[in-house]
Image (cartoon, helix red, strand yellow):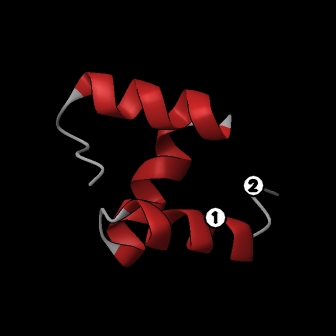
């Protein structure tokens, strides 16, 4: 689960996916905090490629 209230979580995911905090927040707002749903959303939007 990605918890936007825990700075270590946010730092980990933005570093892993090389995205901004805003991009991560938007994805979590859209699909929830489950990692697979967030990564699928980011891929579908062309934000990440892997």
Q: Tags 1 and 2 in contact by the CB under 8 Å rule?
A: yes
Say if residue 19 shows up in the picture. Answer: no
Q: Is residue 39 above or below residue 40?
A: above
Q: In the figure, is residue 6 to the left or right of 28?
A: left
- Residue at mark 2: 48
Q: Is residue 26 above or below residue 8?
A: below
Residue at figure coordinates x 59%, y 34% from the top left: 16
Q: State the image quarter where residue 7 is shown.
A: top left
Regarding residue 1, the answer to whether it shows in the image is yes
**In what quadrant of the picture does the C terminus appear?**
bottom right
The percent coordinates of residue 27 (x first, y second) are 47, 63
- Give the CA separation, mark 1 to mark 2: 6 Å
Badge 1 is on which residue? 42
Drawn side of residue 8 relative to residue 47, left or right: left
Dot 1: element: helix
Total numbered badges shown on the rendered structure: 2
- Residue reaching furthest left? 5
Residue 44 place in picture, x, y as percent = 71, 77
The quadrant the N terminus occupies is: bottom left
Q: Residue at x 30, y 62 (%)?
A: 33
């Amino acid at each position: 689960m990605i918890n936007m209230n825990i700075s270590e979580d946010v730092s980990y995911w933005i570093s892993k996916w090389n995205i901004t905090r805003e991009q991560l927040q938007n994805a979590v707002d859209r699909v929830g905090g489950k990692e697979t749903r967030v990564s699928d959303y980011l891929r579908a939007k062309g934000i990440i490629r892997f």
